Each structure stands twice: as structure tokens, then as C-alpha cells.
Image (cartoon, grey):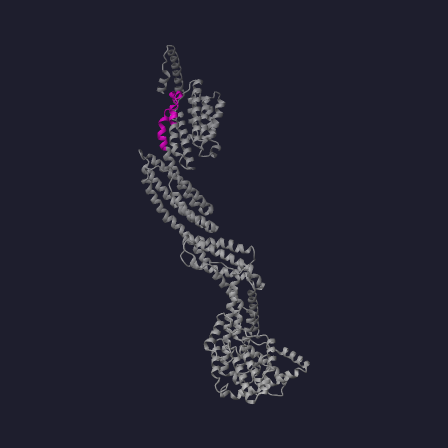
Amino acid sequence: MPILKNLPARLKGGSRVNGELENTRGELILCKMSLNLKSSPFEVPSDNEEWAQANSILDGGAPRDRNPFEDEEDENEANEGRRGGSGKSSFKGTLERIRGVSPLKTLGKLGKGLRMSGRSKGTATPSPQGSVASTPTSEKKKKGRRSSEGSLLRFAGKCRESLRKESLPNGELCSESEGGDSSSRRLSFMKMVGLGKLKRESMADHSSHEEEMVEVVEEVKPREPLSVLEILQLVTKRDLLLADTHILELEQECNEAAAVALPSSPAGGAVPEDLTSPGSKDGGRRKAKDVELLYEALQKELWAVVRESLRSPTAGPNLGLVVQVLQQEEQADRDWAQGEGALPGGPRPRQLKQRWKEAVAEVANGSLPQRNEAQGGELADYLDRVRTRVVEDLGAAKRNVVPVYPEEYEPFQVYLQSYHQAVARRLQSITDDQLMITDIYSLLDWLYNIYNRDVLGTVSMTTSFNRSQLGPLLPSETVDKLELDCLNSVREKVTTELSQVLDEEEKRWMETLHIEEYQITLARTVIQRLQVDLEQSAAINRNLSSRVAQCSLNGLADFLYSFQRKVEMFHEGLVNMVGDNEDGYVSKTIALVNCCPPFRGFVQRCVQCDPAISEDSARRANTSLDRIVNQGVKVLSDRLYERIRPFFDKLVKRKWLNNTEAYEQIESHIKEHFKKFRRMDSPPYQVLVGEVHRRVLMEYLRSIMRGRIICTSLRMRKRMVGRLRDEGKQIKVLFKDLESSSSWLDSAIPHLSEIILLEDIPSIQMEVGVLVREFPDIRKKHVSAILNIRGMTRQTERQEILNIVKDIENSDTLMRLSRDRALFSEVPVTSEVHCLNLGLSRIAITASSCFSSQRLRRTKRAPVSEAYDDML
């Protein structure tokens, strides 16, 4: 060793006093080195420095003493230069060299020189303390911790106690109680150092012996164990695998010491008193406590690496060390379980693999947004941030972390399950509070759709995992409660909120009667409130959508019945209203009818969610809407008919053949009213225009069936038929412009015209057959009235034609015809002209014609025909 090469020669050449003095100084150096001090071996450390050193390491820092290790070759060159000097000056230089050297290295090199000297001497010079194997603890001392290790808890206390025992003023380095033991140690040290010098002198002549000794030294050189502080320094520097290896060794020493300290030795012999003393027990407890503290520091760094690896672009080498530590600790746990490790009941198993999973769970829990960030009404945004963070972190784990772990660790499944459980805890804490209805829908949508589609679905595209191990995010009872809250919210709307809206709307009808408004916001307001629940539930799943739709439809049916009753009361109070508010009443009627199409569409949408369950409620709702529409159409068509009815009385008379004013007035009033009626939405408008179309034709046919014109000649029939065809075409064009869908009504007047005009009986029979098939509600009295108008008096011919109507009435075809194609059923026949009356009338008509011709020749026409018309 470089420090001790010249030390034996100086001791050999000096006097006994000097030798003892120099030996005493060497022993002082060894004493100081055992304290592992920072500065000069002769400098007394303070308590604060020792505690600061221990605390700095426990806090994650490095020891403050500088690196003491120097190159051995430089040491040898310095010793060779000092061999030619005096003993005193060389010893002084040696002390100066030692002053800057680490006591740990000095102690290690000194021990090595002592062991080499002892082997070269053999057993010729026995140690003053006896043989090495003479005590039970000699083997333990060879393999024990360094003298500088100490306990993390009692390190500074030991140093202070050792310094108090030194007595420097009188040249005494140890107390009197330790004098004998100190003298024996100095004697043994002198002999060993002297033998070392003799051997080095003989080595110059015996090179082969030197090589043999070098080889022996290299073979038996033991690996010196590290102190607790040095192990802690490895931990803080994240040399994790090496630190764990030394911790396992220290733990094994504690276990072996505990096994030796049992009441009896394993062989049944007595246990030495020094191992059962209170001081030995306290030292064992301190070592055990040091092991636990080291494990705590180790795990702190392990989980810090696990946490940082997720956020780093790459995992780095530290995560690989974490995996090796986990594998090493798992092996130690298996050895312990097989009885090869610690004693039963000891600190094993440490289960670092399970704690690794817990650390990953803590990483996931700390990474997600906290619960207090979810504000009322903004739960959707919070859940979106949670989704984004989970997807990003799992992607980072897949790229950076998973490749480092062995497959049997299932690292991605561990990360996924940790994040899944962290999300579940967030959602459970959210449901513990009272939520708004919008937040409930957002949460249910996230549970049923977004999490499975955007989180698990996205992850499954890159990595396979076992979904069965994840479990539900929320218990089924909690989910059922959330769905029930949705249904209760819908019921609250239709029973309370919508009723208030309807009451407020009813008051406004009367207050705004003087204002022409053709649209009101009632339907839009009601549907918007119910549509929110229907759309959000439909986006979640079909089951919830069906339940919400049924609940909405039930409440809507009740609401529409109330709406119908209020509309009826409104019309009952204003049906006879005339004057300034008539226009407002008409517009308000149209506005009420315009509410029905949106309501009907919403009812149909609810039915589509579950037709079987919603059938009864849909029928009640549609019935109420039909009544509202029909009542509005009746009110409007009645007001129109009151205006045009006087003009129908002037149709199909003698003046009518030459005067078109009556029909023109009818058409004018219809067009004027439909300027407002067109503001009605479809399909109620189609109902209104169809009803007006049917009623106009019905009144027109009523005028024909009165029989106020009887054609006595072909020429007169042609005039009448021409007039009927013209007005029939005008009616068709009028209602076509009004977008009527009842065009089937327009064929009635042309068919009647053909019956009046045709001459042969078969053609008339065929035309009557066509008329009966298109209008199944026509009866014999209607055909008989047409035959009277055309002047057919022969009963045989009349009966042949009327039998056509009878045959069709008795056929099954009439029963299969649609009921909505009814026109003649409401057209009465006011008069029946018998054959005798027709004959007399015909004679009178002929005489009147002759008289009129004579008067025309006298340059003045006599109005015989007009008198006849008045008579009729």
C-alpha cells in the first residue's frame, strides 16, 4: 500500500519511546479514520456537521466529503522519494499525505497491508489477541460492515462519544480502561509492519515469490461492504440495482444476527454473552431500522422513475433498473417463502411488484383532472378533458414504458386498469352530489358511448387488452338512479312547466286579439323543452330513449288535450264576433291551427322510438290535434260560406243562362278570403282548401238539384250544358290555383252535363254508371232530378236509367269504396217534377214560345219566358 510502505522502517529504526510515540500516532490516525471525518484526522468534528451529513443524504443529496481516492501509482512514486530522507521528516510527510486522504480508503489499504504481513509471517508470531478463530465473532468481524457505517439514526451520537474518550494533552490516546487492549494492538501492529518491511526487502531478490504473493492477494481480496450512508448515496444517484443489492446484503446480515441472538444456537450450544447483551440487541434493531429506511428511500426513487418515465419522450435507462430491482426483489420474496431468506415473521415478502402496480395507480390518479374542476353545467367539458388525458397517457405508456417491461408483467394492462380505476373514482365522486339534468345526460353519454368508443376503442386499435378485467365504471344501481332522474325531469316538465306555458299563452290570446298574427310560439316552446330530453336520450342508448319518449308522449297527450279544451273555449266565446276584431280572430284561429303540424311531427317521432308502447298515447294526442284542426277549418269555412251563400241562390235560373255575375261574386270572395287562409301551414291548409272545394261544389250541385230549369228542347239543353261546363272549368282552375288536392270533385259537373246532353238511352246509362262509380254516395233521387232537368218524361226510359243506380247500390263494390269520396250525400233534392206537370209545363212553354215569336215580329219582344221562370 502506498501510505504504509515506509512506516515499518521508521518504526524499526526509532527508539522504544519514539517507536511507542510513532505507534501511538499511527493508532491515533486509525482512530480518526474509523470516524470517517471530512477534514484532517486530527480535527474534531462537530455534532452539527455529522447530522447535516446524514440529513443531506436522507433528503436525496450526496455526501459533502470530497472524493478521497487518489492514484496508487502517484502514491508509490512519493514513497520512493521519501526513502532516502530521515525517519522523522519522512514520517511527517506521511502524516501530511494522510491528512487529505479519505479515512475509508486509508482504513481499507491499511487493513490490506496488515493481512498481507500476517500471511507472510505465518503463525510464527501469534497475535496478542489470540487466534482469529478463537472467538465466535471473529468471522463476523471479517465480513461485517465498515467501521464508518453507523446507523442513520445514531451515527452522529457515536462519533461524539468516541471523541470524548480521547485524551490528547498527556500524549495518551485512549482512556486508562483501554490501556491494556491498546498496548496489545500496538504490539501486533508493530510486528506486522516490520514483517511487511522485511518482506518488501526480500522481494527485490525473489521475484517469483513476489508474483506468487500478488496472485494470492488478488484471489483472496474481499469486496468490502458499503455503509448505510453510502448505500443511501447510491439510491439518491439512482444507481438503483446496485443499491438494492447492498440493501439485500444488509438485510441478510440483520437476519443472521437475529438468528444468532435467539435463546439457543442452531446447534444447541450456548450463545456468547456479547451477542445477547442489550447493546448488541440495540445495534440489531438499529440496523433493521436502517434497512427499512433504505427501502423507503429506494421505493421513493423507484416510483419517481415510474412517474417520470410516462412524461419523458423516452423511458431512459432508469426504468430498466426499476424492472431489474423488481425482478431481484421478487426473487428474494420467493427465496424467503422457501425458507432460504429471512426468518419466518420477518419483513418479507416486500411485494414490490404489487407496490409497483399501486405506484402506477397513483400516477394515473394524479395525472387526471381533479374532481373540483367539474363545475355545475360544465360536466361535458370536464369529461372531455379526462378522455383526452387518458388517451394521451396510455399512448405514451405504449410508446415509452411498455417495451421496457417483461411480458409477464402485462404493463399495458396494468396502466389501462389503473387509469380505468382512476376514472371510476372520479365518476363516483361526481355522482355523490346532486347533478343538473344536462350533466346527467352528459355523464350517461360518456358512460355508454364516449368512453367505450373514444377511449377503449382508440386504445384497442394499437394494443390488445382484456376488457373483462376492467369492470364497470359505475355500479348498476347508480346508473339506474341517473336514468330515473332523467324520467323524473321529463315528468316535471310536462306536468308543471308546460302547464304554466299554456296558461300564459291562453291569456295572451285575448290580449292580442286586435293584432293579426298567424304564428304563435306555443308549439316551438313546448317541443324545444321536450326535444332536449328526447335527443340526448336517443344519443345515449335505445333503451333510455324509448323510456324517455314514452314519458314525453304520455305527458304531451295530456298537454294537447288541455290545449284542445282551451281552443274550444276560445272559439265558443268568439264565434259570433264581428267588427273590428274579426280579422284578428281569423288570424288567431289560423295561428292555433298552425301549432298542430309541429306537435304531430313530434308525436310521430316519439312513436318511432317504441311503437308498441306509445300506441295509445299517440292516438290520444292525434285525436286532440285533429279536433283542433277541424274546428279551425270549420270556423274559417263557415265564415267564407256566409259570404258566398247568397250568390248560390242565383245559380241555375233563367237569368243565370245569360248572366255570370253570381258566379263571379262567388269566385271573388273565395280568392279574397284565401289571401289570409294561405297563411295556414300544410297539411291543415290542405284540409281547409279541400273542405272549401267540396262545399262550393256541394252548394253548386244543390242549385242544380232544385230543378228550376227544365229543358224543353235540344237547343236549351245545349245552352244549359255549355253554361255548366264553363263554370265547372272555372271552379277546377280556381281550386287548382289554391292548391287543392281534391281534384276528384271536379268531375261531378261534367258527368251531369253529359247526362243532360246525351240523346240515346245506352249512352245515358253508361254515363250514369260512371257517375255512380266515381261518387258512390249518389242516389236515385239525384239521377231522377237530372232526368227531369233534361225533360225526359217517358217512364220506361227513366226506369231503365234508374236501374243502373240500383244495381250498383246492391253490389259489393260500393262497400269497398272510400268513405272520404262523399259529395252527393249532403246534396238534398228539393223538388220532384212529375210526368203530368212536365207535360203541362211543356205545353205552356210551347205556347209561350209562339207568343214570343209573334211579339218579336211586332218589333217588341214579350218576356213570356221570364214570366214562366218567375212562375216556376
Judge whether residue 661 is colored magenta. Answer: yes
- Tell me where residue 16 appears, x and y as whole percent: 56, 89
Residue 467 visible in the picture: no
Residue drawn at (46%, 51%) of the image: 544
Tally of numbered discs: 0
Give left or right: position of 275 versus 431.
Answer: right
Q: Quadrant of the N terminus?
A: bottom right
Residue drawn at (35%, 40%) of the image: 567
Residue 565 visible in the picture: yes
- Tell me where residue 841 appears, x and y as whole percent: 39, 18
Give left or right: position of 200 versus 588.
Answer: right
Judge whether residue 30 is colored magenta. Answer: no
Residue drawn at (50%, 75%) of the image: 290
Along the line of sight, the residue nearer the viewer: 673 or 616: 673
Q: Quadrant of the C terminus?
A: top left
Along the line of sight, the residue nearer the viewer: 808 or 863: 863
Most distant residue in the front direction? 85
- Tell me where residue 382 appears, x and y as whole percent: 45, 55
Residue 699 position by quadrant: top left
Give left or right: position of 63 versus 194.
Answer: left
Most distant residue in the top direction? 858
Q: Main secondary structure of the magenta part?
A: helix
Residue stretch in magenta: 638-666
Residue 866, compared with residue 20, is above or below; it is above
Along the line of sight, the residue nearer the viewer: 592 or 524: 524
- Tell me where residue 619 appears, x and y as whole percent: 42, 43
